[in-house]
Image: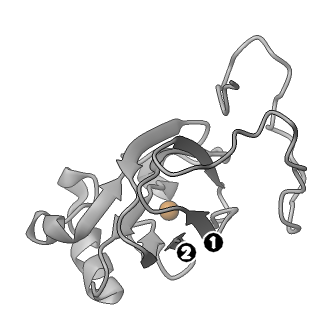
Amino acid sequence: MFTACQDSGSSSDNKEATPPAEAPAAQAPDANTPPAANGEEVAVTLNAGDDMKYDKTEITVKEGQTIKLTLHHTGKAPATAMGHNFVLLANGVDVGKFAAEAAVAKDNGYIPASMAADVLANTSIVGGGETTEVTFKAPAKGVYDFICSFPGHYGMMNGKLNVE
Ligand SMILES: [Cu+2]
């Protein structure tokens, strides 16, 4: 398999001087991409930088798959100023309300305890150069919202998890 987003390793894949990449990451799926089948673990990497954007706004998985999601903060700003996380919300959750509650839940990693039942999966908050991950089982077929719950981010940092 492969390792993704390991910072400060000995390899030379240093992303510090990455030019603004507005185009979707043109990573051709290579022969090493594991086939995605029910029950298997699939790796998803989500990048977000100081521009307050996820590099993917749509993630498609299959029901029953185990998803290992890695969130890599490609920027330089500290978590206190430009923290990012990944929060997958249950169906029917009022995203705006959740985000408002989350914004004042700093002590709990911006996950509001009062709405914890609405969270299907979440990572911790990371700052520039840091990586975090969460492994979770794909929920039932449907479309689910994911957001960054750092204050003020969800309007820019949101996407859909499609479970087929
Ligand atoms: Cu964020």
**Looking at numbered disc 1 in the image, what kind of residue is underneath it?**
Thr
Image quadrant assignment for residue 139: bottom left
* Residue extending farthest top: 10
Return the mark for residue 159: 2
Return the mark for residue 57: 1
Percent of width and height locating residue 157: 54, 72
Image quadrant assignment for residue 53: bottom right
Percent of width and height locating residue 89: 33, 71
Q: Residue at x 87, y 50 (%)?
A: 27
Q: Secondary structure at mark 2?
A: strand
The front one of 126 and 41 is 41
Q: Residue at x 76, y 40 (%)?
A: 33
Residues at badges 2 and 1 in contact (C-beta under 8 Å)? yes
Return the mark for residue 23: none
Percent of width and height locating residue 75: 66, 48
- Is 89 drawn above or below residue 9 in the view shown? below
Q: CA distance from mark 2 to mark 1?
A: 4 Å
